[in-house]
Image (cartoon, rainbow, N blue to C red):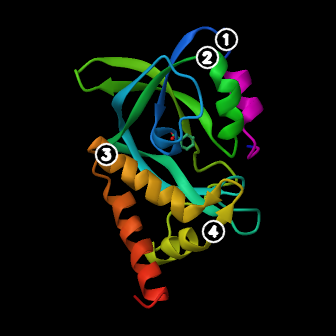
Amino acid sequence: MSVDTAALNAARHRLADDAPVWLFGYGSLIYKVDFPFVQRTPAAIYGWERRFWQGSEDHRGVPGAPGRVVTLIDSPGSRCGGIAYQIAAGVFRHLDVREKHGYLRLWQALHFADGSTVDGLVYIAGPENPGFLGPAPEPEVAAQVARAVGPSGDNRGYLLQLAAALRELGERDEHVFALEAAVLERQRSVSGG
Ligand code: BEZ
């Protein structure tokens, strides 16, 4: 699969521009809302775990020195909390370019706090995409996140913003919070404080 998934996503889902669609955000879509939406609300999906397992060469790293950003890993019984946005399908023209590095849009059941569910689209970068890095020991992941920088800013900022946004939502994500602690500790020890 090509790592540039923008054209693949546009071809996979042929929706009228004004069709209302639900989109689930579990990473930067939670805190970087640079797109119009009709409504948004906390939501969760089941059977997936958020992991810093996708390489970023276009936002939080560069070719040859990729950062790490989140994707979702198939994990029966797990829950991943985030935010659901109702958008007009035409908005995907912007989002497909923003999230073009290996992410395909998949339909999933989105669960709302009131117990209702709706089908929505979720960007997932699977293990078959060339940008997939997979797991690594936490100190290595922390070191990579601490040093990577790309056109959208430093990888550390991405992690810290995501952790803060999850806390604000009341979501506990041990993987994200442990990595945040490791990166902050690393920074303290490097600056001697
Ligand atoms: C998200 O926030 O849902 C998201 C994460 C990675 C890529 C695309 C979207």
Which is more N-terminal, label 1 or label 2? 1
- Can you tell which of label 2 and label 3 is closer to the viewer? 3
What residue range appears in magenta? 2-12
Q: Amino acid at mark 3?
A: Glu
Tell me which image quadrant ligand 1 sits in.
Answer: top right
**Helix, strand or loop at mark 3:** helix
Q: Amino acid at mark 4?
A: Ala
Name the disc covering residue 97, or none.
Answer: none
**Residue 142 point in image, percent of width and height:** 49, 72
User: How many angstroms separate mark 2 from mark 1 (CA)?
Assistant: 5 Å
User: How many angstroms separate mark 2 from mark 3 (CA)?
Assistant: 28 Å
The secondary structure making up most of the magenta span is helix
Q: Amino acid at mark 2?
A: Ala
Q: Classify mark 1: residues with Cα within 10 Å, few (<14), some (14-19) or many (20+).
A: some
When the figure is inspected, residue 44 is found, relative to residue 109, above or below; the finding is: below
User: How many angstroms separate mark 1 from mark 3 (CA)?
Assistant: 32 Å
Q: Is residue 83 left or right of residue 170?
A: right
Q: Which residue is mark 2?
A: 89
Which is more N-terminal, label 4 or label 1? 1
User: How many angstroms separate mark 2 from mark 4 (CA)?
Assistant: 33 Å
| Pointer 2 with pointer 1, Cβ within 8 A | yes
**Helix, strand or loop at mark 4:** loop
Which is more N-terminal, label 4 or label 2? 2
Q: Which residue is mark 1?
A: 17
Q: Amino acid at mark 1?
A: Asp
Q: Which residue is mark 3?
A: 168
Residue in view at x 62 percent, y 63 percent: 67
Q: Which residue is mark 4?
A: 148
Asked if ligand 1 lies within 8 A of label 2, the reply is: no
